[in-house]
Amino acid sequence: MFQTLRPSVVLSAVAFAACATSKTAGGDNGPVPMQLRLAYSGNTGMVVSWNTYSQLSRPTVRYGLSPHDLYETAWSTISITYPTSTTYNNHVQLRDLKPDTLYYYQPEFSNSTTPYTFRTSRPAGDGTPYSIAVVVDLGTMGPDGLTTHVGKGAGNPLRVNETNTIQSLSRFKSGYDFLWHAGDIAYADYWLKEEIQGFLPNTTIAEGAAVYERILNDFYDEMTVVTADRPYMVGPGNHEANCDNGGTTDKVHNITYDVSICIPGQTNFTGYRNHFRMPSSESAGLGNFWYSFDHGMVHYIQIDTETDLGHGLIAPDEPGGSEGEDAGPFSDIKNAQTNWLAKDLASVDRSKTPWIIVAGHRPWYVSAQNDSSDVCLDCQNVFEPLFIQYGVDLVLSGHVHAYERNVPLANYGVDPAGLNNPKAPWYITNGAAGHYDGLDSLLEPLPYYSAFAQDTAYGWSRITFHNCTHMTHEFVASANGTVLDSATLFKKRTCDVQKNHGYRGHDSH
Ligand SMILES: [Fe+2]
């Protein structure tokens, strides 16, 4: 019976929070590293992060240019946890590395007999072609998330033996430099929905906090096959904000749960803020919310569509916002994000990084219900003028769980050049990576600006930068690796980029 989730049990959630710091739930391997993940930290830095059941006094990474001689050591004092977490988040920044160079590394107490590897970022101005992988809206796979069956009212299960997106990303990882995940990470806040729909066993609200953590840890564990040797750059989505999916309704019992059931540790992006270390200090951004970095011919910008839109607007996840998430804002400075964005865009040297690619969780040009949740008109109001002004090449988003490639457009006007040297930014929404209840139906008829759309297959984006003037976006179907959509953008320009003599080779696609 689901009555165990009635609001009267919320008090016991408080008791859970007070005693949940033993860090042994789900196992206790002490200081043994798990959930390894990397993040670029400037052209000569890399942040190595991992979790442990016990707190480390001095998280340490040994590394070097040979697998047999990890002669360098880096350490920090960052081994942090938060209420309801079962683990500690350890973060160590490795500095003064050679650019575009393969390193071998091991966190302390590792059980692995061979070191892990990472490659530092390509310097700005390096014109060597390369690819990246992009996902949005990717959740836990398996018994707590997307699998071959769903609960009552949910849809889009995997077929038996169907390759899921995490498996596909793993299969193709030799073909991309890093993975960019622009929000909605793990979907731990689906625990309540999954219980109400009979997919997971019912628990109390207090026990649900542990289910939330389990889903989160499942996801980080599953992703390690990718994130231990490919930088994993992330952005904020609404499902990182708190524990209740922004409001969850049990129709049978006529109960709607809201953020008030969420206990500290599962509100206000707490897990997201603790788990990752994005390069905001290197780019004058803010935490894991907005930042930028260069990699070869490209300047990448992560924006925050969830909080801190500024300009007197209430962002979707802020108190009073459309999502009911009650999170943020994270800056006290007026218009902090857009002021930063304008300054960041103005500072790009297009002769070295001709491509500017922006990712934000929420779209505004998309074939979905035109409401403030799926179509973020406030985001459009604050961000689009800057994208147009500074000639952003490509804007990536998700949130709507489908794939839609638009034509380049500005202020709802189609650029007559199409993909042949447009002035307007190109918009692609790909929220089809998959999670429990993983796909949305696009609203038909598709609007005039939609060039290709599909809402039935799970998949991820592969973007290839061929040179200064040509870039290809592909939708890769996770089930079999086929490319369901491919389009190449041409920009007429001259650059000062050169191919690196140390080109290492990639899978060709
Ligand atoms: Fe979302």
Image (cartoon, grey):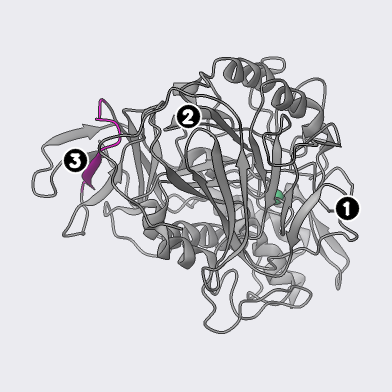
The quadrant holding residue 335 is top right
| Separation of residues labelled 1 and 3 (CA atoms) | 50 Å
Q: From the viewer's perspective, is residue 86 above or below residue 286? A: below
What residue do we see at 54% from left, 35% from top? 469
What's drawn in magenta, residue-wise? Answer: 96-108
| Separation of residues labelled 2 and 3 (CA atoms) | 23 Å
Which amino acid does the dot numbered 1 rest on?
Gln
For mark 1, what is the residue?
369
Which amino acid does the dot numbered 3 rest on?
Tyr
Q: Which mark is residue 63?
A: 3
For mark 2, what is the residue?
293
The quadrant holding residue 420 is top right
Which amino acid does the dot numbered 2 rest on?
Phe
Q: Residue furthest bottom?
A: 160
Where is residue 132 drawn, in percent x and y?
48, 47
Q: From the viewer's perspective, is residue 97 above or below residue 4? A: above
Q: Which of 326 and 365 is in front in this view?
A: 365
Q: Check contact, mark 2 vs mark 3: CB within 8 A.
A: no
| Residue at disc 3, secondary structure | strand
